[in-house]
């Protein structure tokens, strides 16, 4: 299980003006500030008082990756090109939809690749 951060919208505290999409770090900082002081989660960004609207931290959320069967019959994430978390997917459905493309890229059948929860 992993922690997923859904970045929200960075807002100007004084005017409620939308600035841009918040970064994950800004989202976490705003959520932590709100938990500490019970307020809007005011943080300072580039000299402005801001808060993040709509962001959330989801503890224990699942992510999905891939394994491929090696020549000796073992299942391996490395054999499927999973060297880091950069191509993990948020839903099993999205990962399963990628199986035919992955099998084609690896030059194997879809029976030789599978989705795993990471």
Image (cartoon, helix red, strand yellow):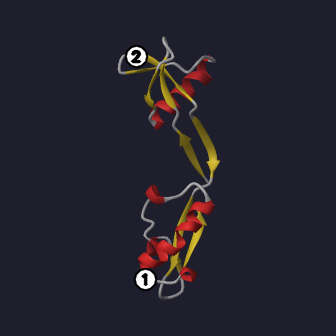
Across the whole image, how many numbered discs are drawn on residues? 2
- Side of 8 where 1 appears, left or right: right
Q: As rendered, which of 44 and 8 lies closer to the eye? A: 8
Residue 61 position within the rendered picture, expressed as x and y whole percent measured from the top left: 63, 50
Numbered label attached to residue 107: 1
Q: As rendered, which of 18 and 113 lies closer to the eye? A: 18
Residue 59 position within the rendered picture, expressed as x and y whole percent measured from the top left: 63, 44
Residue 8 position within the rendered picture, expressed as x and y whole percent measured from the top left: 52, 33
| Circle 1 crowding by C-alpha within 10 Å: few under 14, some 14–19, many from 20 | few
Residue at left offset 51%, top offset 37%: 7
Pointers 2 and 1 in contact (CB under 8 A)? no
* Circle 2 SS class: strand
Residue 70 position within the rendered picture, expressed as x and y whole percent measured from the top left: 48, 83
Q: CA distance from mark 2 to mark 1?
A: 52 Å
Residue at left offset 59%, top offset 38%: 57
Q: Is residue 9 visible?
A: yes
Q: Is residue 118 visible?
A: no
Numbered label attached to residue 48: 2
**Direction left: furthest residue:** 46
Q: As rendered, which of 3 and 14 lies closer to the eye? A: 14
- Which quadrant of the rendered structure holds the N terminus? bottom right
**Direction top: furthest residue:** 14
Q: As rendered, which of 20 and 25 lies closer to the eye? A: 20
**Direction bottom: furthest residue:** 72
* Circle 1 SS class: loop
- Which quadrant of the rendered structure holds the C terminus? bottom right
């Amino acid at each position: 299980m992993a922690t997923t951060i859904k970045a929200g919208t960075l807002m100007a505290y004084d005017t409620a003006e939308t600035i841009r999409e918040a970064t994950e770090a800004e989202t976490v900082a705003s959520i932590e500030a709100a938990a500490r002081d019970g307020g809007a989660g005011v943080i300072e960004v580039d000299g402005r008082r801001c808060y993040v609207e709509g962001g959330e931290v989801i503890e224990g959320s699942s992510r999905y990756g891939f394994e491929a069967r090696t020549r000796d019959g073992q299942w391996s994430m490395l054999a499927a090109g999973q060297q880091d978390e950069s191509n993990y997917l948020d839903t099993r459905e999205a990962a399963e939809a990628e199986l035919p493309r992955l099998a084609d890229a690896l030059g194997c059948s879809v029976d030789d690749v599978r989705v795993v929860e990471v």
